Amino acid sequence: MLLSLTSRSFFLAFLLVATFSNAQVYEDYIGGGHSQGINVLSSDNFDPPFMPGVASAEQTINGSGLDARSFETARFLSQATLGADRETIEQVAQMEFEDWIDDQFNIQSESMLAATDSAYNVGYDIFVGNGGNPEDYFGPYFPHFNYGVWHYNMSNEDLLRQRVALALSEIFVISLRTQLGEYGDGLGDYYDVLLNNAFGNYEDLMLEVSMHPMMGAYLSHFNNPLEIAALNIHPDENYAREIMQLFSIGLYELNIDGSQVLDMNNDPIPTYDNNDIKEFAQVFTGLGPGDIIPNPFVNVPSFGLDFIIADKTVPMTMYDEWHDQSSKQLLNGFVIPAFQDGMDDIEMTIEHLFQHDNVGPFVALRLIQNLVKSNPTPDYIERVALKFNDNGAGVRGDMKAVIKAILLDEEARTCAWINESTHGKLREPMLRYFQFARANDKLAPSGLYWNSGYEFLLLTGQGPLAAPSVFNFFTPDYQPHGDIADAELVAPEFQIHNSRTSVGFMNMTYLWINFSLLWSFEEVEEVYIDQSTLEQMAYDPEVLLNHLDVVYTNGQLTEETRNLIKESMNQINANEFGAFYLDFRVKMALYLIMISPDYAILK
Protein backbone atom coordinates (compact mmCIF):
# COMPACT_ATOMS: atom_id res chain seq x y z
CA MET A 1 0.00 0.00 0.00
CA LEU A 2 1.32 3.42 -0.94
CA LEU A 3 0.90 6.32 1.49
CA SER A 4 1.16 9.81 0.00
CA LEU A 5 1.43 12.74 2.40
CA THR A 6 2.79 16.26 2.15
CA SER A 7 6.10 16.88 3.87
CA ARG A 8 4.47 19.21 6.44
CA SER A 9 1.57 17.04 7.40
CA PHE A 10 1.53 14.98 10.53
CA PHE A 11 0.31 11.48 10.79
CA LEU A 12 0.20 8.95 13.52
CA ALA A 13 2.15 5.90 12.43
CA PHE A 14 0.89 2.73 14.03
CA LEU A 15 3.46 0.07 13.36
CA LEU A 16 2.15 -3.37 14.10
CA VAL A 17 4.68 -6.15 13.78
CA ALA A 18 3.73 -9.57 15.20
CA THR A 19 2.09 -8.94 18.60
CA PHE A 20 4.00 -5.72 19.34
CA SER A 21 2.67 -2.24 18.66
CA ASN A 22 4.24 1.15 19.11
CA ALA A 23 2.66 4.51 18.22
CA GLN A 24 4.91 7.32 17.03
CA VAL A 25 4.27 10.78 15.61
CA TYR A 26 6.09 11.03 12.25
CA GLU A 27 6.24 14.07 9.96
CA ASP A 28 7.07 12.55 6.55
CA TYR A 29 5.95 9.86 4.16
CA ILE A 30 7.00 6.25 4.58
CA GLY A 31 9.14 4.46 2.01
CA GLY A 32 12.14 5.22 -0.15
CA GLY A 33 14.39 5.51 2.90
CA HIS A 34 12.01 7.86 4.74
CA SER A 35 11.99 5.99 8.04
CA GLN A 36 14.49 7.94 10.13
CA GLY A 37 13.62 7.99 13.79
CA ILE A 38 11.07 5.21 13.60
CA ASN A 39 11.68 2.21 15.85
CA VAL A 40 10.27 -1.05 14.56
CA LEU A 41 9.69 -3.89 17.01
CA SER A 42 9.48 -7.46 15.84
CA SER A 43 8.95 -10.87 17.38
CA ASP A 44 12.18 -12.02 15.75
CA ASN A 45 15.33 -10.16 14.71
CA PHE A 46 17.18 -13.17 13.35
CA ASP A 47 20.25 -12.34 11.27
CA PRO A 48 21.73 -15.00 8.97
CA PRO A 49 25.45 -15.53 9.59
CA PHE A 50 27.65 -12.90 7.95
CA MET A 51 24.59 -11.04 6.60
CA PRO A 52 23.74 -8.49 9.30
CA GLY A 53 20.53 -6.57 8.83
CA VAL A 54 19.14 -8.63 5.97
CA ALA A 55 16.08 -9.72 7.97
CA SER A 56 15.88 -6.80 10.40
CA ALA A 57 12.46 -5.41 11.29
CA GLU A 58 13.34 -1.99 9.87
CA GLN A 59 13.36 -3.50 6.39
CA THR A 60 9.57 -3.87 6.59
CA ILE A 61 9.07 -0.12 6.49
CA ASN A 62 12.04 1.53 4.80
CA GLY A 63 11.56 -0.16 1.44
CA SER A 64 15.00 -1.73 1.42
CA GLY A 65 15.16 -4.92 -0.58
CA LEU A 66 12.61 -3.91 -3.20
CA ASP A 67 14.53 -4.45 -6.41
CA ALA A 68 12.32 -3.00 -9.15
CA ARG A 69 14.31 0.23 -9.47
CA SER A 70 17.57 -1.71 -9.31
CA PHE A 71 16.41 -4.00 -12.11
CA GLU A 72 15.34 -1.02 -14.20
CA THR A 73 18.65 0.75 -13.64
CA ALA A 74 20.75 -2.34 -14.33
CA ARG A 75 18.93 -2.79 -17.63
CA PHE A 76 19.58 0.85 -18.55
CA LEU A 77 23.27 0.54 -17.69
CA SER A 78 23.54 -2.69 -19.70
CA GLN A 79 22.60 -0.59 -22.72
CA ALA A 80 24.55 2.55 -21.81
CA THR A 81 27.84 1.21 -20.43
CA LEU A 82 30.38 -1.57 -20.81
CA GLY A 83 29.13 -2.97 -17.52
CA ALA A 84 28.33 -1.86 -14.00
CA ASP A 85 28.88 -3.25 -10.52
CA ARG A 86 26.16 -3.26 -7.85
CA GLU A 87 27.44 -0.06 -6.25
CA THR A 88 27.20 1.84 -9.53
CA ILE A 89 23.73 0.43 -10.19
CA GLU A 90 22.44 1.62 -6.81
CA GLN A 91 24.02 5.05 -7.24
CA VAL A 92 22.42 5.58 -10.65
CA ALA A 93 19.11 4.24 -9.31
CA GLN A 94 18.89 7.37 -7.16
CA MET A 95 19.00 9.58 -10.27
CA GLU A 96 16.81 10.30 -13.24
CA PHE A 97 18.38 8.57 -16.23
CA GLU A 98 18.46 11.78 -18.24
CA ASP A 99 20.33 13.51 -15.42
CA TRP A 100 22.88 10.69 -15.39
CA ILE A 101 23.33 11.04 -19.16
CA ASP A 102 23.84 14.79 -18.79
CA ASP A 103 26.47 14.17 -16.11
CA GLN A 104 28.20 11.69 -18.39
CA PHE A 105 28.29 14.24 -21.21
CA ASN A 106 30.42 16.45 -18.96
CA ILE A 107 33.02 13.80 -18.08
CA GLN A 108 36.13 13.93 -20.24
CA SER A 109 38.02 10.80 -21.22
CA GLU A 110 41.68 10.27 -20.76
CA SER A 111 43.59 9.66 -23.97
CA MET A 112 43.73 6.05 -25.13
CA LEU A 113 46.94 6.94 -26.95
CA ALA A 114 48.41 8.02 -23.62
CA ALA A 115 47.14 4.81 -21.99
CA THR A 116 48.75 2.76 -24.78
CA ASP A 117 52.07 4.57 -24.50
CA SER A 118 52.00 4.24 -20.71
CA ALA A 119 51.45 0.49 -20.98
CA TYR A 120 54.35 0.22 -23.40
CA ASN A 121 56.70 2.24 -21.18
CA VAL A 122 55.79 0.36 -18.01
CA GLY A 123 56.11 -2.97 -19.81
CA TYR A 124 59.48 -1.96 -21.20
CA ASP A 125 60.79 -1.01 -17.75
CA ILE A 126 59.59 -4.30 -16.28
CA PHE A 127 61.05 -6.32 -19.15
CA VAL A 128 64.45 -4.63 -18.97
CA GLY A 129 64.40 -4.69 -15.16
CA ASN A 130 64.00 -8.45 -15.31
CA GLY A 131 67.13 -8.76 -17.43
CA GLY A 132 65.55 -8.64 -20.88
CA ASN A 133 67.40 -7.25 -23.87
CA PRO A 134 65.88 -3.82 -24.67
CA GLU A 135 66.06 -4.61 -28.40
CA ASP A 136 63.78 -7.60 -27.87
CA TYR A 137 60.88 -5.55 -26.48
CA PHE A 138 58.62 -4.56 -29.37
CA GLY A 139 55.97 -1.94 -29.63
CA PRO A 140 53.89 -0.23 -28.92
CA TYR A 141 51.69 -2.67 -30.84
CA PHE A 142 48.21 -4.10 -30.41
CA PRO A 143 48.71 -5.77 -26.97
CA HIS A 144 49.73 -2.40 -25.53
CA PHE A 145 46.57 -0.85 -26.98
CA ASN A 146 44.52 -3.63 -25.36
CA TYR A 147 46.40 -3.16 -22.09
CA GLY A 148 45.42 0.50 -22.16
CA VAL A 149 41.77 -0.14 -23.02
CA TRP A 150 41.26 -2.75 -20.31
CA HIS A 151 43.23 -1.01 -17.60
CA TYR A 152 41.40 2.26 -18.18
CA ASN A 153 37.96 0.68 -18.29
CA MET A 154 38.29 -1.03 -14.93
CA SER A 155 38.17 2.20 -12.91
CA ASN A 156 36.93 4.97 -15.21
CA GLU A 157 33.96 7.29 -14.76
CA ASP A 158 33.23 8.08 -18.43
CA LEU A 159 31.01 5.03 -18.77
CA LEU A 160 28.69 6.29 -21.50
CA ARG A 161 31.44 7.74 -23.68
CA GLN A 162 33.35 4.44 -23.64
CA ARG A 163 30.21 2.51 -24.61
CA VAL A 164 29.37 4.85 -27.49
CA ALA A 165 32.97 4.81 -28.73
CA LEU A 166 32.92 1.01 -28.87
CA ALA A 167 29.67 1.18 -30.85
CA LEU A 168 31.22 3.69 -33.25
CA SER A 169 34.25 1.42 -33.67
CA GLU A 170 31.87 -1.16 -35.14
CA ILE A 171 30.66 1.36 -37.73
CA PHE A 172 33.94 3.12 -38.60
CA VAL A 173 35.91 -0.11 -38.67
CA ILE A 174 39.67 -0.50 -38.75
CA SER A 175 41.27 -3.74 -37.62
CA LEU A 176 44.33 -4.74 -35.66
CA ARG A 177 44.18 -8.11 -37.44
CA THR A 178 45.95 -6.42 -40.35
CA GLN A 179 49.31 -4.65 -40.48
CA LEU A 180 47.69 -1.99 -38.30
CA GLY A 181 48.16 -4.30 -35.33
CA GLU A 182 51.85 -3.40 -35.42
CA TYR A 183 51.07 0.21 -34.52
CA GLY A 184 49.61 0.47 -31.04
CA ASP A 185 50.04 4.22 -31.00
CA GLY A 186 47.95 4.52 -34.16
CA LEU A 187 45.26 2.28 -32.69
CA GLY A 188 45.15 4.36 -29.53
CA ASP A 189 45.00 7.63 -31.44
CA TYR A 190 42.26 6.36 -33.74
CA TYR A 191 40.23 5.29 -30.71
CA ASP A 192 40.69 8.79 -29.32
CA VAL A 193 38.98 10.13 -32.45
CA LEU A 194 35.96 7.97 -31.61
CA LEU A 195 36.03 8.96 -27.94
CA ASN A 196 36.43 12.66 -28.64
CA ASN A 197 33.57 12.70 -31.15
CA ALA A 198 31.21 10.35 -29.31
CA PHE A 199 29.33 13.37 -27.94
CA GLY A 200 30.17 15.71 -30.81
CA ASN A 201 28.79 16.05 -34.32
CA TYR A 202 28.58 13.21 -36.83
CA GLU A 203 29.93 15.39 -39.65
CA ASP A 204 33.09 16.15 -37.67
CA LEU A 205 33.45 12.45 -36.90
CA MET A 206 33.21 11.56 -40.60
CA LEU A 207 35.90 14.10 -41.48
CA GLU A 208 38.33 13.12 -38.71
CA VAL A 209 37.95 9.42 -39.50
CA SER A 210 38.53 10.14 -43.21
CA MET A 211 41.75 12.01 -42.43
CA HIS A 212 43.21 9.50 -39.98
CA PRO A 213 46.27 7.63 -41.32
CA MET A 214 45.08 4.34 -39.81
CA MET A 215 41.86 4.55 -41.80
CA GLY A 216 43.88 5.73 -44.81
CA ALA A 217 46.03 2.62 -44.62
CA TYR A 218 43.12 0.29 -43.89
CA LEU A 219 40.93 1.46 -46.77
CA SER A 220 43.81 2.46 -49.03
CA HIS A 221 43.36 6.19 -49.58
CA PHE A 222 46.72 6.84 -47.91
CA ASN A 223 49.09 7.73 -50.79
CA ASN A 224 46.17 7.50 -53.22
CA PRO A 225 47.33 9.29 -56.42
CA LEU A 226 45.38 11.07 -59.11
CA GLU A 227 44.84 9.26 -62.40
CA ILE A 228 47.88 8.95 -64.69
CA ALA A 229 46.45 7.02 -67.63
CA ALA A 230 49.78 6.70 -69.46
CA LEU A 231 51.17 4.79 -66.49
CA ASN A 232 47.93 2.87 -65.90
CA ILE A 233 47.57 4.54 -62.49
CA HIS A 234 44.01 5.07 -61.27
CA PRO A 235 42.58 6.33 -57.97
CA ASP A 236 41.79 3.61 -55.46
CA GLU A 237 38.03 3.26 -55.04
CA ASN A 238 37.95 1.45 -51.71
CA TYR A 239 37.33 4.36 -49.36
CA ALA A 240 34.97 6.05 -51.81
CA ARG A 241 32.76 2.97 -51.67
CA GLU A 242 32.87 2.34 -47.94
CA ILE A 243 32.30 5.91 -46.79
CA MET A 244 28.96 5.69 -48.56
CA GLN A 245 27.97 2.09 -47.93
CA LEU A 246 29.16 1.67 -44.34
CA PHE A 247 29.66 5.11 -42.82
CA SER A 248 26.80 7.29 -44.02
CA ILE A 249 24.05 6.43 -46.53
CA GLY A 250 23.99 2.68 -47.17
CA LEU A 251 23.09 0.90 -50.37
CA TYR A 252 19.48 1.98 -50.88
CA GLU A 253 17.38 5.11 -50.51
CA LEU A 254 15.62 5.21 -47.13
CA ASN A 255 12.51 6.77 -45.69
CA ILE A 256 12.85 8.57 -42.38
CA ASP A 257 11.72 5.39 -40.55
CA GLY A 258 14.49 3.30 -42.10
CA SER A 259 12.28 1.52 -44.63
CA GLN A 260 13.47 1.39 -48.22
CA VAL A 261 12.14 3.80 -50.83
CA LEU A 262 10.69 1.77 -53.71
CA ASP A 263 10.37 2.60 -57.38
CA MET A 264 7.27 2.00 -59.52
CA ASN A 265 8.21 -1.68 -59.77
CA ASN A 266 8.49 -2.00 -55.97
CA ASP A 267 12.25 -2.39 -56.22
CA PRO A 268 14.63 -0.57 -53.85
CA ILE A 269 16.43 2.44 -55.31
CA PRO A 270 20.26 2.33 -55.10
CA THR A 271 21.90 5.33 -53.48
CA TYR A 272 24.90 5.23 -55.84
CA ASP A 273 26.40 3.31 -58.76
CA ASN A 274 29.89 2.50 -60.04
CA ASN A 275 30.22 5.85 -61.79
CA ASP A 276 29.53 7.60 -58.49
CA ILE A 277 32.25 5.54 -56.83
CA LYS A 278 34.74 6.63 -59.48
CA GLU A 279 33.83 10.29 -58.93
CA PHE A 280 34.16 9.98 -55.14
CA ALA A 281 37.49 8.17 -55.57
CA GLN A 282 38.89 11.25 -57.30
CA VAL A 283 38.02 13.31 -54.22
CA PHE A 284 40.13 11.13 -51.95
CA THR A 285 43.37 11.53 -53.90
CA GLY A 286 46.50 13.31 -52.74
CA LEU A 287 46.40 12.38 -49.05
CA GLY A 288 49.73 11.30 -47.57
CA PRO A 289 51.69 11.34 -44.31
CA GLY A 290 51.12 14.35 -42.09
CA ASP A 291 54.41 13.71 -40.31
CA ILE A 292 57.06 11.01 -39.97
CA ILE A 293 58.57 9.09 -37.10
CA PRO A 294 62.33 9.23 -36.44
CA ASN A 295 64.09 7.13 -39.05
CA PRO A 296 67.50 6.98 -40.77
CA PHE A 297 66.14 7.58 -44.27
CA VAL A 298 64.18 10.85 -44.58
CA ASN A 299 63.75 14.02 -42.56
CA VAL A 300 60.48 15.41 -43.93
CA PRO A 301 57.18 13.81 -44.93
CA SER A 302 56.24 13.54 -48.58
CA PHE A 303 53.64 11.84 -50.73
CA GLY A 304 54.45 8.21 -51.47
CA LEU A 305 56.50 7.50 -48.34
CA ASP A 306 55.92 4.04 -46.95
CA PHE A 307 53.30 3.87 -44.21
CA ILE A 308 55.84 2.39 -41.81
CA ILE A 309 57.60 5.78 -41.68
CA ALA A 310 54.42 7.84 -41.25
CA ASP A 311 53.44 9.15 -37.84
CA LYS A 312 50.22 7.24 -37.18
CA THR A 313 49.01 9.83 -34.66
CA VAL A 314 49.01 12.82 -37.03
CA PRO A 315 46.17 13.35 -39.55
CA MET A 316 47.04 12.87 -43.19
CA THR A 317 47.87 16.02 -45.13
CA MET A 318 46.88 16.99 -48.65
CA TYR A 319 49.55 16.98 -51.36
CA ASP A 320 47.70 18.98 -54.01
CA GLU A 321 50.09 18.01 -56.79
CA TRP A 322 48.81 14.44 -56.35
CA HIS A 323 45.15 15.45 -56.06
CA ASP A 324 42.72 15.22 -58.97
CA GLN A 325 41.89 18.81 -59.94
CA SER A 326 38.93 18.03 -62.21
CA SER A 327 35.30 18.68 -61.31
CA LYS A 328 33.47 15.80 -59.64
CA GLN A 329 29.86 14.81 -60.29
CA LEU A 330 28.58 13.46 -56.98
CA LEU A 331 25.08 12.38 -55.90
CA ASN A 332 21.78 13.92 -56.94
CA GLY A 333 23.40 16.39 -59.33
CA PHE A 334 25.83 17.87 -56.80
CA VAL A 335 29.04 19.11 -58.48
CA ILE A 336 32.41 19.91 -56.93
CA PRO A 337 34.08 22.58 -59.09
CA ALA A 338 37.46 22.04 -60.73
CA PHE A 339 40.78 23.44 -59.54
CA GLN A 340 39.92 23.64 -55.85
CA ASP A 341 42.34 22.83 -53.07
CA GLY A 342 42.17 19.15 -52.28
CA MET A 343 40.97 19.71 -48.72
CA ASP A 344 38.13 21.88 -50.00
CA ASP A 345 37.04 18.94 -52.16
CA ILE A 346 37.11 16.57 -49.20
CA GLU A 347 35.26 18.90 -46.83
CA MET A 348 32.58 19.61 -49.45
CA THR A 349 32.19 15.87 -50.08
CA ILE A 350 31.83 15.04 -46.39
CA GLU A 351 29.21 17.77 -45.99
CA HIS A 352 27.43 16.54 -49.14
CA LEU A 353 27.16 13.02 -47.73
CA PHE A 354 26.29 14.28 -44.24
CA GLN A 355 23.32 16.22 -45.64
CA HIS A 356 21.91 13.18 -47.47
CA ASP A 357 18.42 12.17 -46.30
CA ASN A 358 19.63 8.63 -45.57
CA VAL A 359 22.13 9.53 -42.87
CA GLY A 360 19.61 10.06 -40.05
CA PRO A 361 17.82 6.69 -40.35
CA PHE A 362 21.10 4.95 -41.27
CA VAL A 363 22.87 6.10 -38.10
CA ALA A 364 19.75 5.63 -35.98
CA LEU A 365 19.40 1.97 -36.94
CA ARG A 366 23.09 1.17 -36.50
CA LEU A 367 23.30 2.68 -33.02
CA ILE A 368 19.95 1.32 -31.82
CA GLN A 369 21.02 -2.15 -32.91
CA ASN A 370 24.34 -1.83 -31.11
CA LEU A 371 23.01 -0.36 -27.87
CA VAL A 372 19.43 -1.55 -27.41
CA LYS A 373 17.80 -4.03 -29.77
CA SER A 374 18.22 -5.77 -33.11
CA ASN A 375 14.76 -5.06 -34.52
CA PRO A 376 13.59 -1.56 -33.62
CA THR A 377 10.18 -0.55 -34.87
CA PRO A 378 9.99 1.97 -37.72
CA ASP A 379 8.58 4.49 -35.23
CA TYR A 380 11.63 4.11 -32.97
CA ILE A 381 14.00 4.60 -35.90
CA GLU A 382 12.03 7.63 -37.05
CA ARG A 383 12.07 9.28 -33.61
CA VAL A 384 15.85 8.93 -33.41
CA ALA A 385 16.41 9.94 -37.04
CA LEU A 386 14.38 13.11 -36.52
CA LYS A 387 16.63 14.00 -33.58
CA PHE A 388 19.64 13.40 -35.81
CA ASN A 389 18.17 15.74 -38.40
CA ASP A 390 17.38 18.43 -35.82
CA ASN A 391 18.33 18.35 -32.16
CA GLY A 392 15.61 20.87 -31.37
CA ALA A 393 17.91 23.83 -31.87
CA GLY A 394 18.38 23.48 -35.61
CA VAL A 395 21.59 21.41 -35.38
CA ARG A 396 21.98 18.31 -37.54
CA GLY A 397 24.11 15.35 -36.43
CA ASP A 398 24.26 16.21 -32.72
CA MET A 399 25.39 12.96 -31.13
CA LYS A 400 24.22 13.97 -27.66
CA ALA A 401 20.68 14.38 -28.93
CA VAL A 402 20.89 11.07 -30.79
CA ILE A 403 22.19 9.18 -27.75
CA LYS A 404 19.46 10.58 -25.52
CA ALA A 405 16.82 9.76 -28.10
CA ILE A 406 18.03 6.15 -28.27
CA LEU A 407 18.47 5.45 -24.56
CA LEU A 408 15.42 7.33 -23.25
CA ASP A 409 12.95 6.22 -25.92
CA GLU A 410 9.90 4.35 -24.69
CA GLU A 411 10.99 1.34 -26.72
CA ALA A 412 14.25 1.19 -24.76
CA ARG A 413 12.78 1.99 -21.35
CA THR A 414 9.21 0.68 -21.13
CA CYS A 415 9.10 -2.69 -19.40
CA ALA A 416 6.21 -3.83 -21.60
CA TRP A 417 8.69 -4.36 -24.43
CA ILE A 418 10.56 -7.00 -22.42
CA ASN A 419 7.84 -9.55 -23.15
CA GLU A 420 7.80 -8.84 -26.89
CA SER A 421 9.37 -11.73 -28.80
CA THR A 422 10.88 -9.31 -31.33
CA HIS A 423 12.60 -7.25 -28.64
CA GLY A 424 16.20 -7.58 -27.47
CA LYS A 425 19.57 -8.58 -28.84
CA LEU A 426 22.33 -11.09 -28.28
CA ARG A 427 25.07 -9.58 -26.13
CA GLU A 428 28.38 -9.59 -27.94
CA PRO A 429 31.02 -11.80 -26.29
CA MET A 430 33.33 -8.87 -25.56
CA LEU A 431 30.49 -6.95 -23.89
CA ARG A 432 29.87 -9.95 -21.64
CA TYR A 433 33.60 -10.02 -20.87
CA PHE A 434 33.70 -6.32 -20.04
CA GLN A 435 30.62 -6.59 -17.85
CA PHE A 436 31.92 -9.58 -15.92
CA ALA A 437 35.25 -7.84 -15.30
CA ARG A 438 33.61 -4.60 -14.21
CA ALA A 439 30.93 -6.23 -12.05
CA ASN A 440 33.31 -8.21 -9.84
CA ASP A 441 35.84 -7.18 -7.23
CA LYS A 442 39.36 -7.78 -8.49
CA LEU A 443 42.77 -8.55 -7.02
CA ALA A 444 45.58 -6.96 -9.02
CA PRO A 445 48.83 -7.11 -6.99
CA SER A 446 50.63 -4.98 -9.57
CA GLY A 447 47.83 -2.42 -9.75
CA LEU A 448 47.68 -3.04 -13.50
CA TYR A 449 44.60 -4.42 -15.21
CA TRP A 450 46.36 -5.46 -18.38
CA ASN A 451 44.73 -7.79 -20.85
CA SER A 452 46.21 -8.50 -24.27
CA GLY A 453 42.86 -9.90 -25.39
CA TYR A 454 44.64 -12.44 -27.57
CA GLU A 455 43.17 -15.61 -26.07
CA PHE A 456 39.66 -14.15 -25.99
CA LEU A 457 39.99 -13.05 -29.62
CA LEU A 458 41.18 -16.52 -30.56
CA LEU A 459 38.28 -18.28 -28.82
CA THR A 460 35.39 -15.88 -29.46
CA GLY A 461 36.51 -13.83 -32.46
CA GLN A 462 36.09 -10.49 -30.69
CA GLY A 463 38.07 -7.62 -29.21
CA PRO A 464 38.20 -3.83 -29.53
CA LEU A 465 39.24 -2.79 -33.07
CA ALA A 466 39.63 -6.47 -34.00
CA ALA A 467 36.91 -7.06 -36.61
CA PRO A 468 37.83 -9.52 -39.38
CA SER A 469 36.87 -7.04 -42.13
CA VAL A 470 35.54 -3.56 -42.77
CA PHE A 471 32.08 -5.11 -42.50
CA ASN A 472 32.59 -5.50 -38.75
CA PHE A 473 32.19 -8.74 -36.80
CA PHE A 474 28.65 -9.08 -38.16
CA THR A 475 26.39 -7.29 -40.62
CA PRO A 476 23.31 -5.35 -39.47
CA ASP A 477 20.95 -7.40 -41.62
CA TYR A 478 22.19 -10.89 -40.72
CA GLN A 479 19.43 -13.47 -40.34
CA PRO A 480 20.24 -16.85 -38.79
CA HIS A 481 18.32 -19.70 -40.36
CA GLY A 482 15.18 -20.79 -38.57
CA ASP A 483 12.52 -18.91 -36.65
CA ILE A 484 14.27 -15.53 -36.82
CA ALA A 485 14.63 -15.59 -40.59
CA ASP A 486 11.13 -17.02 -41.01
CA ALA A 487 9.76 -14.08 -39.02
CA GLU A 488 11.73 -11.69 -41.27
CA LEU A 489 13.74 -10.46 -38.31
CA VAL A 490 17.48 -9.90 -37.98
CA ALA A 491 19.95 -10.91 -35.28
CA PRO A 492 23.35 -9.43 -36.21
CA GLU A 493 25.40 -10.78 -33.30
CA PHE A 494 24.37 -14.36 -34.10
CA GLN A 495 26.66 -14.17 -37.14
CA ILE A 496 29.61 -14.81 -34.78
CA HIS A 497 27.68 -17.23 -32.55
CA ASN A 498 28.64 -20.70 -33.69
CA SER A 499 29.89 -23.96 -32.23
CA ARG A 500 33.46 -22.68 -31.97
CA THR A 501 32.81 -19.25 -30.48
CA SER A 502 30.00 -20.32 -28.15
CA VAL A 503 32.09 -23.12 -26.66
CA GLY A 504 35.07 -20.77 -26.63
CA PHE A 505 33.13 -18.27 -24.54
CA MET A 506 32.01 -20.99 -22.14
CA ASN A 507 35.60 -22.14 -21.74
CA MET A 508 36.78 -18.59 -21.07
CA THR A 509 33.99 -18.15 -18.51
CA TYR A 510 35.00 -21.38 -16.80
CA LEU A 511 38.56 -20.08 -16.53
CA TRP A 512 37.49 -16.71 -15.06
CA ILE A 513 35.20 -18.27 -12.48
CA ASN A 514 36.66 -21.61 -11.46
CA PHE A 515 40.26 -20.41 -11.38
CA SER A 516 39.28 -16.83 -10.47
CA LEU A 517 41.72 -15.84 -13.22
CA LEU A 518 40.44 -12.83 -15.13
CA TRP A 519 43.52 -12.50 -17.33
CA SER A 520 47.24 -13.18 -17.26
CA PHE A 521 50.37 -12.03 -19.06
CA GLU A 522 54.12 -12.19 -18.82
CA GLU A 523 54.99 -8.64 -17.78
CA VAL A 524 53.05 -8.41 -14.48
CA GLU A 525 51.20 -10.60 -12.01
CA GLU A 526 47.82 -12.08 -12.89
CA VAL A 527 44.53 -10.38 -12.11
CA TYR A 528 42.11 -12.49 -10.09
CA ILE A 529 38.44 -12.22 -9.22
CA ASP A 530 37.77 -11.57 -5.53
CA GLN A 531 34.61 -13.52 -4.69
CA SER A 532 34.64 -12.93 -0.92
CA THR A 533 31.66 -10.55 -0.98
CA LEU A 534 29.63 -13.01 -3.02
CA GLU A 535 30.56 -15.81 -0.63
CA GLN A 536 28.85 -13.94 2.22
CA MET A 537 25.67 -13.95 0.16
CA ALA A 538 25.97 -17.63 -0.71
CA TYR A 539 24.79 -18.75 2.76
CA ASP A 540 21.33 -18.22 1.33
CA PRO A 541 21.13 -19.12 -2.38
CA GLU A 542 18.17 -16.76 -2.83
CA VAL A 543 20.20 -13.80 -1.58
CA LEU A 544 23.03 -14.51 -4.03
CA LEU A 545 20.64 -15.18 -6.90
CA ASN A 546 18.79 -11.93 -6.28
CA HIS A 547 22.10 -10.06 -6.42
CA LEU A 548 23.18 -11.79 -9.62
CA ASP A 549 19.76 -11.18 -11.13
CA VAL A 550 20.22 -7.45 -10.60
CA VAL A 551 23.78 -7.23 -11.90
CA TYR A 552 23.62 -9.62 -14.84
CA THR A 553 20.07 -10.46 -15.90
CA ASN A 554 18.40 -7.19 -14.90
CA GLY A 555 15.48 -8.85 -13.13
CA GLN A 556 14.76 -11.20 -16.03
CA LEU A 557 16.08 -14.43 -14.54
CA THR A 558 13.37 -16.96 -15.31
CA GLU A 559 11.93 -19.22 -12.63
CA GLU A 560 13.22 -22.22 -14.57
CA THR A 561 16.79 -20.93 -14.58
CA ARG A 562 16.56 -19.69 -10.99
CA ASN A 563 15.33 -23.05 -9.72
CA LEU A 564 17.99 -24.92 -11.67
CA ILE A 565 20.77 -22.78 -10.20
CA LYS A 566 19.30 -22.85 -6.69
CA GLU A 567 18.99 -26.63 -6.77
CA SER A 568 22.62 -26.91 -7.89
CA MET A 569 23.73 -24.57 -5.09
CA ASN A 570 21.75 -26.41 -2.43
CA GLN A 571 23.57 -29.61 -3.30
CA ILE A 572 26.82 -27.89 -2.32
CA ASN A 573 26.94 -27.94 1.48
CA ALA A 574 29.48 -27.87 4.29
CA ASN A 575 29.12 -31.56 5.07
CA GLU A 576 30.19 -32.68 1.61
CA PHE A 577 32.39 -29.78 0.46
CA GLY A 578 33.94 -28.65 3.71
CA ALA A 579 35.09 -25.14 4.55
CA PHE A 580 35.13 -24.03 0.91
CA TYR A 581 31.51 -24.83 0.13
CA LEU A 582 30.54 -21.14 -0.14
CA ASP A 583 33.28 -20.61 -2.72
CA PHE A 584 31.95 -23.56 -4.72
CA ARG A 585 28.40 -22.21 -4.50
CA VAL A 586 29.48 -18.85 -5.88
CA LYS A 587 31.39 -20.47 -8.72
CA MET A 588 28.42 -22.65 -9.64
CA ALA A 589 25.94 -19.77 -9.59
CA LEU A 590 28.17 -17.37 -11.52
CA TYR A 591 29.00 -19.90 -14.20
CA LEU A 592 25.39 -20.94 -14.77
CA ILE A 593 24.27 -17.30 -14.91
CA MET A 594 26.99 -16.36 -17.40
CA ILE A 595 26.15 -19.17 -19.84
CA SER A 596 22.38 -18.86 -19.49
CA PRO A 597 20.14 -17.52 -22.26
CA ASP A 598 18.61 -15.23 -19.63
CA TYR A 599 21.91 -13.34 -19.56
CA ALA A 600 23.01 -13.83 -23.16
CA ILE A 601 19.94 -12.01 -24.49
CA LEU A 602 19.69 -8.36 -23.49
CA LYS A 603 16.05 -7.27 -23.33
Image (tube, rainbow, N blue to C red):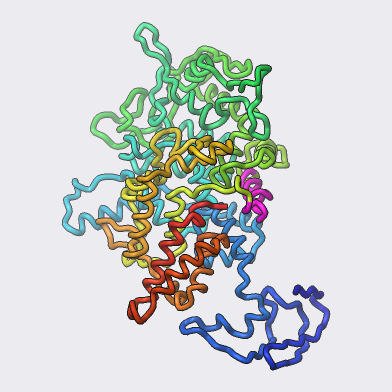
Residue placed at 52% from the left, 66% from the top?
86
Task: Please tell me whether residue 536 is drawn above or below residue 404 in the rendered image.
Answer: below
The quadrant of the rendering that contains the N terminus is: bottom right
Is residue 168 something that shows in the picture?
yes
- Taking 329 as reference, is 46 above or below it? below
How far from the left and from the top, in percent, is residue 217?
38, 30
Where residue 573 appears, as percent x and y from the top left, is 39, 78
Q: Is residue 531 above or below residue 281?
A: below
Taking depth in this image into account, of 175 and 483 the one nearest to the observer is: 483
Q: Position of residue 286 (x, y in %)?
A: 43, 21
- Farthest-out residue, right: 9
Q: How many marks?
A: 0
In this view, the residue in front, 565 or 349, is: 565
In the figure, residue 462 lies in which quadrant? Answer: top left
* Residue 117 visible at all: no
Q: Is residue 330 a member of the stretch shown in magenta?
A: no
| Magenta stretch: helix, strand or loop mostly | helix
Tell me what residue is drawn at x 32 percent, y 67 percent.
Answer: 445
Q: Is residue 417 magenta?
A: yes
The magenta region covers 402-419
In the image, is residue 156 above or below residue 584? above
Name the residue at 68% across, 73% down.
32
Image coordinates for residue 23, horizontal then vertical, percent: 76, 91
Residue nearer the viewer, 283 or 50? 50
